[in-house]
Image (cartoon, rainbow, N blue to C red):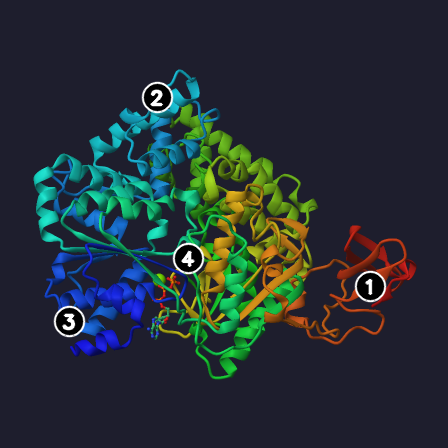
Amino acid sequence: MDISLLVDQLNDGQRNAVAASSPHQLVLAGAGSGKTRVLVHRIAWLLEVEGVSPFAVMAVTFTNKAAKEMKGRLEELLNVPANGMWVGTFHGLAHRFLKLHWREAGLPQHFQILDSDDQLRLVKRVMRENNVDDSRYPPKQIQWFINEQKDEGRRAAHVMPSSDPFAKTLREVYYLYEQICQQNGLVDFGEILLRAHELWLENPDLLAHYQQRFRNILVDEFQDTNNIQYAWIRLLAGNKVSVMAVGDDDQSIYGWRGANIGNIRDFQQDFPGAELIKLEQNYRSTKTILAAANAVISNNSGRLGKNLFTDGAEGEPIRLYSAFNEQDEARYIADQVDNWAKEGNARADMAILYRSNAQSRTLEEALLRAGIPYRIYGGQRFYERLEIKNALAYLRLLLNRDDDGSVERVINVPARAIGEKTVDILRSFARDQGCSLWKSCELAIANNALPKRATSSVQSFLDLVDEMSAGIEELELQEIVSHVIENSGLIEHHKKEKGEKGQARVDNLEELVNAARQFDADEEPDLAEEDGDQPLSELAQFLDRAALDAGDGQADEYEDAVQLMTLHSAKGLEFPQVVLAGLEEGLFPHKMSMDEAEGLEEERRLAYVGITRAMDQLIITHAESRRLYGQENFSTPSRFIREIPSEYISEVRLKNTVSRPLSARPKLGGAITTGRKLLDDSLPYGLGQRVLHAMFGEGTVVQFEGQGNGLRVQVNFDDAGSKWLVVSFAKLEAL
Ligand code: ATP
Ligand code: MG
C-alpha cells in the first residue's frame, strides 16, 4: 500500500501515536477523536512500515462487532486477509488460547462453554445436591458472587475464610461448583478469563513463548477493562511486548460490572516509558453536538481532563421533543425515521438509543405499525426475551393446558425440583398414551409412575396453573397478566437475581402488563365476532399478537433498517442521526444509580457516550408520563437535558391538534394509529395542552376518559402532582 496514504489521513497527534517509537503508549482522548482509527492505523503501520508479522500483533476490542469491523478496515487498508490475525474481545482471545492449550490449562479438549443461564442451572443443581436452602441463598446471588470472584482472579480457595455463616456458604457453594465444572469440563464466561490468566501463571515456558511471539498488543476502550483482563495483558506483555492502550475515562460505563477506571491511572506506572498521547480534535460530531456533550460531562468530578474541539460545521440545534406519554414519544420517533428516509437517507444511518431494554417495546410497536424495518442490536426483541416467553407460556396454559411447548418451558421455571429425568418420564408417558404433556402429568400422578418427590412437584405445578386460571374471566386483560407474572413466581424468581440483569427482567415482566393494558383488541384484524370483548378471547388475541411480533418485523440482514440499542451497546459506534429516548429523571439517570455520587457520574458518562454517537443530528425525547414496568410515572425531564445550554436546543412544539379518540376505557394504544385525528369538538384541549387550575396551578393534560358530562382529564400539575378532574366542574383554563 501507499504508506503516505496511511498517515495523510491523520492529524499530528494521531500520527505521533501511529508512528510512535516509545516503548508503550497510552492514548487518552475524548469521544470521536479518532482513537479507534489510530489503533487500526497503528496496526497497518506496524505491518507495513515496521515489517511486523500479522501474527505478532494482538488487538483487543470491546465487542465482536468491533473486532469484525477492525478486521474489515485492516483488509481494506492493507489489502490482505485479516482472518488469522489475533483481533477479538478479551473473551474471544482468551478462549482461543484455551482451545490451543487445553492440556496446559487443565481442561478436556472439548470443554464446553456455559452461558449465563446454563451457569445458573448448574449453581442450582449444586445447591440442591448439597442441601443449600435456596430461599436463604438466592441462586442468582451465588452466581453473581462466583462471577465477581472470578473477575477479581479469585478461586474459592482464595476467598478469605469467614466465620459468618452466609459468607461461608457462598464460599462453599463456589468450591463445589468449581469441582463440578472441573469434573465435567465446563467453563463459564468468567472462567475463560480466569483460566487464561492461570495459563500464563502456571506455564512460564508457554508464557515466554508468547511474549516472544507477540510484539505488539493494542487495547481499545481501555477504560472498561476489569482487573483480571488488565492482569492478563500485563502478564502477556511481560517486559518485551509493546502495549498501546486507547481509552477515554469519560466513557467508562461498566463500573457496575467490575471495570476499573483506575487501570488508566496505573498504566504509566505498570508500563515504564509509556508515552501519554492526547487527541483533542473531534471528527465525528457537529460543533453543537460536541458542545452539548462537553457541557454535560463537565458536571462530573475527578476527570482526567481533556479538551475537545471540532472544525466541523455548526450543525443544527439539538431537537428536544417533550412527549405527553411514551406512546406519543414512540410515534414521534417513528415519524422522524420516516422523514429521515424520505429525505433520501439510509435508515441504517439512524439509531434510537435508550437506557433500559424495557423501553424498546413501545418503540418496536410504533415502528411495526408504521411498517418501518428495524433491527435491535446487541439485544433481543421484547417478545423474544426469556422472561417474557416464560410469562407468555403461563398465559397460554391458562387458555390451553394441552400446549406442550408451554408446559415444557415452564414446568420447572421457577425451579420446583422437576428434573430432566422426570420430564423425560412424562414425555414418554405422553408418547405412549398419545396424549398431551399436561394429561401425562395427571396420568403419571394417578398411576404412581413418578418418584414421590417428583409426584408432589408435578402436582404443585398442575395446581398452580389451575389456581391461576380460577376466576380470570372476571379480570381485565392487564389484570390477568399481572396476576400471572406475580402468582407464577416469575417476578419473585427474577427479583432474586442480583445486579442489572435480574432487575431488567423484572422490568420487562412489568412492561408486559403495560403491553396488555395498551393492547387494543379492536385493532386486531381477525376479531371473532361472537366473543365480543371477553377477557379470555382478548387474551388469546394478545398472545397471537405477541407471537407475531416475535416472529417478524426484525429486518433481515440486508434490509435497510433503523438501529435500536441500549446506550451501553452503542459504545464506539457512530450514526449520522441519533435519537436519545426517555431522558427522564428516574429512567435516565436510572433510579438505581441516582442516589450515590458515583452511580450518578457513571450515568452521566453514559449520557456523554449517547450524545457523542451522533454525527450530524441529535434528537432528544422525554415523556411527561410514562407507563413502564407496569406503573405510570410522571417524571421531570432528565437533569442531563438541563445540563445542555439552551442555546444548543430547539424545542419541537406540540401540535395542539394531536389527540387520541375518546373511549369508555382509555387505551393509549389507539394514539398510534389515530393520533392525528382532529380534536373532537367537545374537547376543550388536546393532550399535552398546558392548563391552569384555580387551586392546583399549572399543569399538562396527559389523558382523557369518558364522554360528555362524564368527560374526565388527567392533569399532571407542576406542583400538585397528577389529578383526575371532571372537565365540566374543573374549570380549567387553557394556557
Ligand atoms: P469513541 O470514543 O466514540 O470510540 P474514537 O475516538 O474511537 O471514538 P473514531 O471512531 O476512531 O473515534 O473516529 C471518529 C470518526 O472520526 C470516524 O468516523 C473516523 O473515521 C473520523 N476521523 C478520525 N480521525 C480523522 C481524521 N484525522 N481525519 C478525518 N476523519 C477522522
Ligand atoms: Mg472508538
Residue 569's tag is 4
Give left or right: position of 521 versus 358: right
Q: Position of residue 689 (x, y in %)?
A: 77, 67
Q: CA distance from mark 3 to mark 4?
A: 29 Å
In what element is the residue under mark 3?
loop
Residue 80's tag is 3
Q: Which residue is mark 2?
A: 130
Q: CA distance from mark 2 to mark 3?
A: 55 Å
Question: For ligand 1, which image quadrant applies?
Answer: bottom left
In what element is the residue under mark 2?
loop
Which of the two labelled residues, at mark 3 and mark 4, occupies the earlier sequence position?
3
Q: Position of residue 289 (x, y in %)?
A: 51, 69
Tell me what residue is drawn at x 9 percent, y 50 percent.
212
Front residue (pair 713, 442): 713
Give left or right: position of 443 versus 514: left
Identified by mark 2, the residue type is Asn
Residue 59's tag is none
